[in-house]
Amino acid sequence: MTTPVTITYLQMRSPDELRAAPPPRVADVQLRRAEVPCPAFSRFLYTAVGGDWYWRDRLGWTQTQWREYLERPGVHTWLLSVRGTPAGYVELERQQQDVEIAYFGLLPEFIGQGLGGWLLSEAIRHAWEMDAPRRVWVHTCTLDGTAALPNYQARGMTVYREETKLIDDPGQPDGPWPGSNRSAAP
């Protein structure tokens, strides 16, 4: 069985196009760049944020693959924390003249608290600081959270391409660890 998935590509061509979200009203919010490449921590963020959204492309990566990727000078990971607890992250990747928002999201416990728009706004600001890129871009799909596409558009990113692909039925999302799928019926 196959499932149609629509992939939407968005971009911003000038930092002046950013429509920043207001700062969150949650107490003690911090955004810091993770400057020490740490495969275990990055894999934790990847599974904790993406487990409910079918993020599977890196699950098979070895520690060496993670380290090689994270040590590339054009890869920047930004950690969002609330009162010292990881709440989300964004991974920016410099690609020739562009910066891709490669991964972005919140841990499930922090969704709905007004953090996502602010985190994306800050991510876009930091992307524009990465050696004056020609554009900042991202892609999302219909397997991602329903707030993803509206958030990108609300920040000023515009759609430049859409495509629909048939994929093998992905089943239920994996959750952040095997057997933890929060969206499956009990």
Image (cartoon, rainbow, N blue to C red):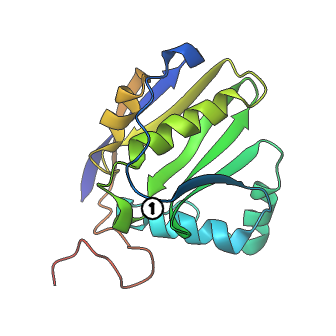
Q: Find disc 1 in the rendering and name its residue.
A: 50
In the rendered view, does 143 fall on the left or right side of 29?
left
Q: Is residue 136 above or below residue 120?
A: above
State which quadrant residue 160 falls in.
Answer: top left
Asked if one can make out residue 108 in the rendered structure from this viewpoint, the answer is yes
Quarter the C terminus occupies: bottom left
| Nearer the observer, 22 or 36 | 22
Give the structural element (helix, strand or loop) at label 1. helix
x, y percentage for residue 142?
30, 45
Q: Is residue 55 above or below residue 9?
A: below
Amino acid tagged 1: Gly
Q: Is residue 15 above or below residue 110?
A: above
Quarter the N terminus occupies: bottom left
Asked if one can make out residue 13 in the rendered structure from this viewpoint, the answer is no
Q: Residue at x 50, y 49 (%)?
A: 104
State which quadrant residue 70 falls in.
Answer: bottom right
| Nearer the observer, 48 or 126 | 126
| Nearer the observer, 42 or 24 | 24
| Nearer the observer, 36 or 67 | 36
x, y percentage for residue 158?
41, 20
x, y percentage for residue 119?
49, 44
In the rendered view, does 150 fall on the left or right side of 117?
left
Q: Residues within 10 Å of mark 1 (few under 14, many from 20)?
A: many
In the rendered view, does 23 fall on the left or right side of 96?
left
x, y percentage for residue 120?
48, 40
In the rendered view, does 75 fall on the left or right side of 145?
right
